[in-house]
Image (cartoon, rainbow, N blue to C red):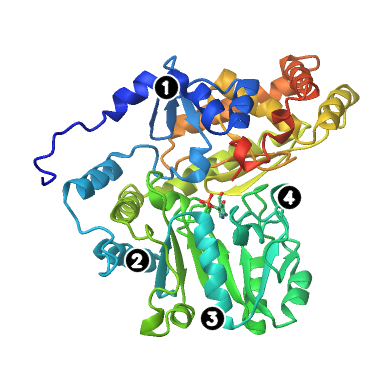
Amino acid sequence: MTHELAPRIAPDISTLFAEREADRYDMHSRHLNEQMVRVLRTIGYDVQFRRGTGPYLFDAAGERYLDLLSGFGVFGIGRNHPVLRDALKDVLDSDLPNLVQLDVSTLAGILAERLLAHVPYLDKVFFANSGAEAVEAAIKFARTATGRPGLVFCDHAFHGLTNGALSLNGDAVFRDGFEPLLPDCVRVPFNDLAALERALASRRVAAFVVEPIQGKGVNMPAPGYLQAAAELCRRHGTLLVADEIQTGLGRTGRFLAVEHWNVEPDMVLLSKSLSGGHVPSSAVLMRRHIFEKMFDRMDRAVVHGSTFAKNDLAMAAGIATLDVIEQERLIDRAARMGDRLLRELTAMVPRYEMLREVRGKGLMIGIEFGAPASLRLKASWSVVETASKGLFCQLITIPLFKEHKILCQVAGHASHTIKLIPAFVITDDDCDWIVRAFDETIAGSHRVPGAVWSLGKTLIGHAARGRKPVRTFGSARQETPANT
Ligand SMILES: Cc1ncc(COP(=O)(O)O)c(C=O)c1O
């Protein structure tokens, strides 16, 4: 029987979703990650999101939320963008010759051409399925291209959680319990050129892998750091790999974040926004000589690869995403909205003693808090922070969520920085919403006694009763959305 004649009993996914959505927490407790459910229930985020569009989410009660987390940064063009939806439907309706494997993909050719047009000094593209998989590929490309084993990475770096990528992770919380990882990986402090030079001097280092702006903490490169690092790499025969998985495709107000500092890496890693959020996808852009060292003979044509990497849905999602970014001028928009948010949030710093700094580029913004000077706040801060370092930020993010319907994350384990990575499509009204919500919430945190500090006591109570999520929220990936 051909598939045209088969009876059509396809599941109606939206009906299935509607029928079972109320069970989601129970299903996850039973069959998936119970700790995640405990986290959500403890902090009151179990609101049963039902719908997403653009930068907004809607819960079971019909409340609209402004999503400043955007699925860890994947919904650059917004959720469920109609152009992306049409592109994906078109693929499904077209009976394309997907994943023939003993052919080459037309859509992959188009997407590679389109990506390289934005990065003209690079020549070749390798596609993969996720950020971590792009990092794994970069490690292999760098080692085989240079014939060297070494890899240098930075303190606080986050490049993914597979074994190779984890070997380049600068945070013990992620590494503990999984070592030994890859040998010959050397950690250097971010922004420390002398340490980088010492590490590269061995001339055994294949690649320096670095996020132009670190996702954990939203740490900015010091002026001149990335250019000088690129020069050091060139001098020592090391490849510079820019992990732009989070920063790339317009998030920082340029197609690549490295453009802010006029740096041309040897490899650039892209993912997150590339997929439009709907189909896992990643790309490694690189110089020709690196690519050709890996694929140097016909019998090595498949020496590295991944079955689903160039699948038509992912490639079409990438093409449609680039179209939307170009047609809606979303890179300019990210720059404009980001400048506005940076300016208006920074203007609050002198008014609030616990608000230390606002930093970032485009729509990747870190809002950092720190210990107060006044006695009246000092005692409360110290109770909360002694119970769990970084807990103060949860006292900001939870009221932002509950009272202002803003979803955002803490920028890492024990961090005092809240990170904003919204969709590039946010509007001036959304910026007003963000600024007003932060202003009111931060003002509330400067009142003692007050609701914010009572929340602190409640969370500490949960932690004391062994409900670990309070401590780990913002740290372990499996347990928390506070992690990219
Ligand atoms: C800079 C960076 N690199 C790599 C990754 C890993 O990507 P994935 O979670 O798709 O494996 C992330 C994810 O947060 C990231 O932010």
Which sits earlier in the primary sequence, circle 1 or circle 4?
1
Residue 134, image x, y percentages: 50, 61
Classify 10 Å Cα crowding around label 1: few (below 14), some (14-19), many (20 and above). some
Residue identified by numbered label 3? 145
Callout 3–callout 4 Cβ contact below 8 Å: no
Q: Residue at x 46, y 45 (%)?
A: 74
Quarter of the image where the N terminus is located? top left
The three-letter code of the residue at mark 1 reads Glu
Picture residue at 60% right of the left edge, 41% below the top: 343
Residue displayed at 41% across by 24% down: 50
Q: Amino acid at mark 2?
A: Ala
Instruction: Tell me, for residue 326, which label it has, or none.
Output: none
Dot 4: element: loop
Indicate the secondary structure of the residue bearing disc 1: helix
Question: What number is the disc on residue 21?
Answer: 1
Q: Rounded to the nearest whole Å, what is the CA distance between mark 3 and mark 1?
A: 49 Å
On screen, residue 227 versus residue 140, left or right, reads right
Q: Which label lies toward us, 2 or 3?
A: 3
Sequence-wise, the earlier of marks 3 and 1 is 1
Residue identified by numbered label 2? 112
- Identify residue type, mark 3: Ala
Q: Secondary structure at mark 3?
A: helix
Asked which quadrant contains residue 139, the reply is bottom right
Residue 177 has which mark?
Answer: 4
**Residue 117 locus on image (x, y percent):** 36, 68
Question: Considering the numbered disc 2 on the image, is that residue within a helix, a strand or a loop?
Answer: helix
Q: Can I make out residue 229 in this image?
A: yes
